[in-house]
Image (cartoon, rainbow, N blue to C red):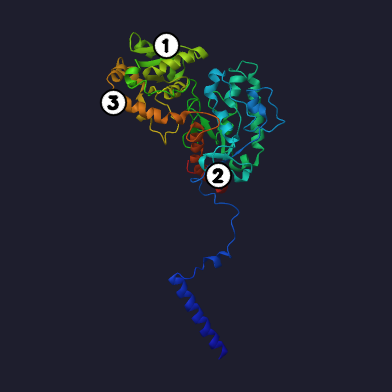
Amino acid sequence: MYVKTICIIVFFVFLIASYSIYMGTVDPRPYFSQLQSQPRRASPCSITGRPLRVFMYDLPRKFNVAMMDPQSSDVEPLTGKNLPSWPQTSGIKRQHSVEYWLMASLLHGGGGGEEEKEAFRVFDPELADAFYVPFFSSLSFNTHGKNMTDPDTEFDRQLQVELMEYLENSKYWQRSGGRDHVIPMTHPNAFRFLRQQVNASILVVVDFGRYPREMARLGKDVVSPYVHVVESFTEDGGVDTPDPFEARTTLLYFRGNTVRKAEGKIRLRLEKLLAGNSDVHYEKSVATTQNIKVSTEGMRSSKFCLHPAGDTPSSCRLFDAIVSHCIPVIISDRIELPFEDEIDYSEFSVFFSIKEALEPGYILNNLRQFPKEKWLQMWENLKNVSHHFEFQYPPKREDAVNMLWRQVKHKIPSVKLAVHRNRRLKVPDWWL
């Protein structure tokens, strides 16, 4: 009797509860959530909607700023306040200083919230999406011997040896095989002794001219601009220049070293093809403080700036032209360009293959017939993107540093895929 009564009561309670849930008057989720374990931190499955969390190794200063300031001491922690400024008199070394600006951006703690940054520094490596290795490999090459016969070259090699020993003893390097570590090497000879040991890392390079495919490739690495060495043109297009097309009286401008390797040998041949044209300025020159000033004025007074390959497919001249608002004329069959998943270079640059460039009259005929309206549109587009190629401290929204960190963030999903697969595969890369 009692059992039958209890069963009837339970049935009616269940019926009423079911009806309430169906009608939306009762939400059962708070009750069931008590049975679920609480997560320790936010899901690591996606970083699209937030800045990149970067752990920066605290390396002795000999690996970085001591190359700029030999008096810099390891006694005091390096911060945004005691970080040495990049020297104004650094000359040609400046174009390879990307490593410095990336480090500086992580040391900078002020200016806006985390939501306005593409990356910010975390001090707990367990929270990091990526690991930054603040080794100034390009500056090390430029400082400690530029060729293999210099006695100081041994110091450059020793720094690389010590760095790799340090990294290989890190459990975070071991955990990913270095895949989530960001290593800048924008000089083509940077990290030249032990490059093969960082094959798996995210390399920040300016092109792939000196690297084998198993080491550097678009799928895992980031293509950076050179840091421009001419001053940015900030007054172009003001009230004093109502017609910039007419104000720029030189059609095509080039000033630089004509003795180059590989694809860069085209420079000597172009010199002969372009000689004797009054609307072309083509001059052999080396990078000195005075010559950089002359190039600055020349680019600002030219409609088009010639960018043939250098020792590698790219050169600093391209980015000097961009900040001078001079339409780049790019001649290189194997060039890779920075931020190309976001920026369409065809909207503000002209491209010729090497074969086309060496055809007598081909370049000049095309440029002389270039419609004024089209040039003006390209010029406007160029001015609108030039801020993406500025390296500065403190960093600013959408500048080159923030664009680079965003590029790194784009690589992280494929890094996670590679790390996770590697942990469970019995035969690594079995499909190859």
Q: Residues within 10 Å of mark 1 (few under 14, many from 20)?
A: some
Q: Sequence order check: which comes first, mark 1 or mark 2?
A: 1
The secondary element bearing badge 1 is classed as: strand
Quarter of the image where one finds residue 19: bottom left
The CA distance from mark 1 to mark 3 is: 29 Å
Do the numbered discs 1 and 3 sit on residues whose CB atoms are within 8 Å? no
Amino acid on which disc 1 is placed = Glu
Labelled pair 1, 2 in contact (Cβ < 8 Å): no
Check disc 1 and report the residue beneath it. Answer: 283
Residue in front for this viewpoint, 15 or 384? 384
Percent position (x, y) of residue 301?
38, 17
Q: Is residue 39 above or below residue 272?
A: below
Residue on which disc 2 sits: 419
Query: Is the residue under label 3 in contact with that under label 2 (CB below 8 Å)?
Result: no
Query: How far apart in space, not on screen, are marks 2 and 3 (Cα)?
Result: 51 Å
The spot of residue 405 in percent (x, y) is 51, 36
Alpha-carbon neighbours of circle 3 within 10 Å: few (<14), some, or many (≥20)? few
Residue corresponding to mark 3 = 373
Residue that extends furthest to the bottom in the rendered view of this protein = 1
In the foreground, 425 or 161? 161
Please indicate, yes or no, whether residue 347 appears anywhere in the rendered image: yes
Badge nearest the viewer, 1 or 3? 3
Query: Is 206 in front, or is 22?
Result: 22
Answer yes or no: is residue 191 visible.
Answer: no
Q: Label 2: how many residues lie within 10 Å, few (<14), some (14-19) or many (20+)?
A: some
Q: Position of residue 223 (x, y in %)?
A: 48, 31
Q: Amino acid at mark 2?
A: Val
How far apart are the two marked residues, 1 and 2, measured between alpha carbons? 50 Å
